[in-house]
Image (cartoon, helix red, strand yellow):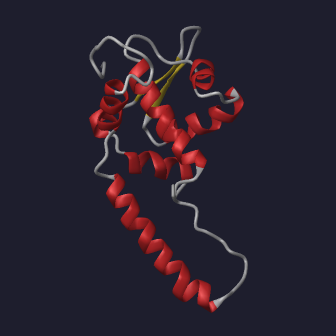
Amino acid sequence: MILLPRRALLAVCAVVDVAIHARIAPVAAKALATRHSLPPRHLETLLQALVHANILKGVRGPRGGYELARERRRITMAEIVRAALNEGDEDSFGAPSRLLNEIVAPLARDAGQQFLASLEAVSVDDLCRKAEAGEVFGQMTSAADFTI
């Protein structure tokens, strides 16, 4: 059972894709969308959320696109998930149920925090290494993982 919504999973995939492909030049949203069979407009809002969270950096211009804002070993899977899900927004269930508000929601929130804590141990570098070892994008040449 996968506990993360599709948006969070796509965000992780997008960041790993950018980490692998943006070594020479920024990755265009269109290329990213094509590799993952998504409409570019759907992906753009997600990429902007990752830029606002300082995970990705947007590069403007004809050869623009996205690249990592920091070293891939310094970005965790939990950070990406939080950015994708806009964790600052509190869940609003609409009904003033004491059972929901006092028992169920706090337990679910605690379980979610434990889940995110386990994702803190997984870096983008870890995911990239697995993707490269599995040749997810075919055989690729190695290059530096971050430029200043």
- On the question of residue 114 being in view, the answer is yes
Q: Quadrant of residue 56?
A: top left
Residue 33 screen position, x and y as percent: 62, 25
Eyeballing the image, is 27 above or below 119?
Answer: above
Residue at position x 39%, y 26% in the image: 19
Eyeballing the image, is 148 above or below 109?
Answer: above
Eyeballing the image, is 78 above or below 141?
Answer: below
Q: Is residue 99 left or right of residue 74?
A: right
Q: Residue furthest bottom?
A: 98
Residue 95 screen position, x and y as percent: 72, 82
The quarter in which the C terminus is drawn is top left
- On the question of residue 71 being in view, the answer is no
Residue at position x 43%, y 71% in the image: 111
Q: Quadrant of residue 113?
A: bottom left
Eyeballing the image, is 141 above or below 13?
Answer: above
Which is nearer the eye, 130 or 86?
130
Residue at position x 35%, y 36% in the image: 127
